[in-house]
Amino acid sequence: MAREGIEELNDKYGNETGGPFFLFHRPADGIPGADLDGHERKRGKLAELNLLLRGGAPDRFSAVVAGRRICRTSDS
């Protein structure tokens, strides 16, 4: 549902190079017994987003919806 919403927004407000809306879904870490506060969870998400934008860690996110290509990959 979220993916469809982002795609609709990009269709409506985007241009030929893409749209301004993105969705990055990262599953929960699933560390049993870990008591991470909001700051630590956010820091981990930002670190993994930074890796993704720099061309690494594509498997850290279970869903990436982007109106334009934002990630460098080895095939580009």
Image (cartoon, grey):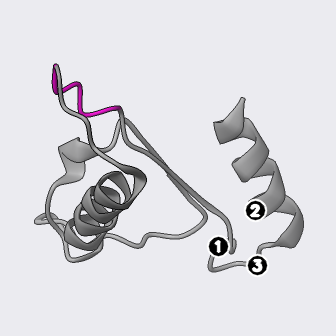
Q: Regarding mark 1 in the picture, which secondary structure is present there?
A: loop
User: How far apart, in angstroms, are the residues tagged by discs 2 and 1?
Assistant: 7 Å
Q: Residues within 10 Å of mark 3 (few under 14, many from 20)?
A: few
Q: Regarding mark 3 in the picture, which secondary structure is present there?
A: loop
Rendered position, 28 above or below 10:
above
Q: Residue furthest top?
A: 32
Give the labeled residue for mark 2. Answer: 10
Please report the bounds of the magenta region as a residue range: 28-32
For the stretch drawn in magenta, the main secondary structure is: loop
Nearest the viewer among 37 and 27 is: 37
On the image, which quarter does residue 10 sit in? Answer: bottom right
Give the labeled residue for mark 3. Answer: 15
Q: Give the image location of residue 60, x and y in percent.
A: 23, 45
Residue drawn at point x = 17 percent, y = 22 percent: 33
Nearest the viewer among 11 and 6 is: 6
Residue drawn at point x = 33 percent, y = 32 percent: 28
Rendered position, 21 above or below 6:
below
User: How far apart, in angstroms, are the residues tagged by discs 2 and 3?
Assistant: 8 Å
**Given contact means CB atoms under 8 Å apart, are the residues at marks 2 and 1 in contact?**
yes
User: How far apart, in angstroms, are the residues tagged by discs 1 and 3?
Assistant: 5 Å
Q: Is residue 58 magenta?
A: no
Give the labeled residue for mark 1. Answer: 18
Residue drawn at point x = 72 percent, y = 29 percent: 1
Q: Give the image location of residue 65, x and y in percent.
A: 53, 51
